[in-house]
Amino acid sequence: MIFVLVISLLLLFLLGVPVAISLGISSSLALLVAGDIPLLALAQRAFVSLDSFPLLAIPLFILAGALMEYGGISQRLINLANAITGHVSGGLAIVTVVTTMFFAAISGSSVAATAALGAILVPAMIKRGYEKGVAGGVQAISGTLGIIIPPSIPLILYGTAVGASIGDLFVAGMVPGIIIGIGLIVTVYILAKKRNYTKESKKSAKEIWKAFVDAIPALIMPVIILGGIYSGIFTATEAAGVAVAYAFIVSVLLYRTITKENIKEILTAASLTTSTLMLILATAGLFSWILTIENIPQQVASFITSISDNPMVFLGIVVLLLLLVGMFMETNAAIIILAPILVPVAIELGISPVHFGIVMIVTLAIGMVTPPLGLNLFVVSKIANIRIDHLTRSLIPFYIAILICLLAITFIPGLTMSVVEWMK
């Protein structure tokens, strides 16, 4: 059964079949081979995988992100970041990193952050003399922060899959997100100094204040979301509903950038993204269920602990595994499939599931910018009109920076857990 499951899945991936359909077909074939499980279980397990209150946060955060994108929030965040950091060497590239960090605290999606901001910032960087590869690379790798800095859709998926506190995961993701952001800014600064990139003009205190006031409604949103969760006012799912209401009020009544005509486009875009993701979750949940009834998690645990029962060695093995998986598998599907297998081993070795979740998300986020499946690379290559291989070569300095940050986050648990413990 497992042989058919794994081999059919790999073959379907090689044939280029979409992830959700590949997971569904391979799971169906495995059940047919087993013979003693009715095919009705396909529909039942797919439904059970989606029958979760925390998962309701996903379509709501997606809708909130779409409202923010159409509502002109991204441009106001860019203006604020430009006013603060634009005059530094490599100013516009630093603006890209800083703005993406702001946007990540709103959207919860890597691709959404890359597409929404890249359409504005990548052409602007190219116009100011940045090579296409560098301009696209900065935006692509900054986009990974979209699933690390809370609210993060993959963090919600992870928490749901393993029963970890989504609130604790959100808090734990803040410091790693800031660390990676600083690492990327330092890399940009070094490259800019070396290649003598153009600086933006320094803004006056009055201009900085104006940009800040204009962006206040956008900056308040993550405060409301995280503040509400940790003050106990509402859950992560309820926070997503509040985010939708807030984004709608700000975009329609305050900024007045969304019209009746835009509403249909926003709902259509959010629905398409949600339906695609939910189909992956349904089939990935079925796939994960088959692995569970065949005791694969226990076998994997036994194999890894037979190599070493040192938590640091285990984390190193997991990072290498996830870096490889991230190159070939969509992030959300990888979480649903692998988290239930790996987390029990981590807990057995004394590793906090919250810390392990952050390590898992950060590692898989790198897969968003590594070929052949790096979604951010495809988005940016179209915007910058550059080939994937050229874009990947330009990313080498940023790969080094983000890997150094990953190692620090992985092997220094205090970077993630200290804030969680302080908040309790």
Image (cartoon, grey):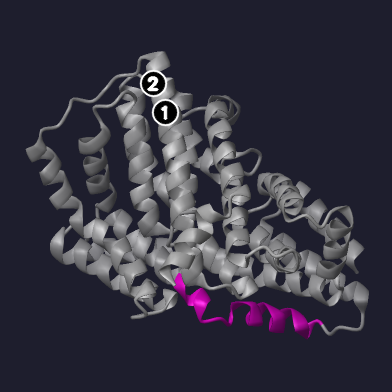
The label on residue 64 is none
**How far across and how far down the image is residue 316, in percent?**
72, 47
Give the residue number, with chain letter if any, for mark 2: 192
Please state the extent of the stretch shown in magenta in the rendering.
Answer: 39-57
Disc 2 element = helix
The residue at 48%/25% (across/down) is 133
Give the residue number, with chain letter if any, for mark 1: 188
Q: Quadrant of the N terminus?
A: bottom right
Q: As drawn, is 338 to the left or to the right of 129? A: right
The residue at 56%/45% (across/down) is 375
**How far across and how far down the image is residue 69, in percent?**
32, 54
Type of amino acid at the residue the image marks with label 2: Ala
Does residue 109 show up?
A: no
Q: Is residue 261 above or below residue 363?
A: below
Instruction: Tell me how many marks there are.
Output: 2
Q: Quadrant of the C terminus?
A: bottom left
How many residues crowd mark 2 within 10 Å: few (<14), some (14–19), many (20+)?
Answer: many
Query: Residue 278 occupies which quadrant of the picture?
Result: bottom right
> What is the CA distance from the residue labelled 1 to the residue labelled 2?
6 Å
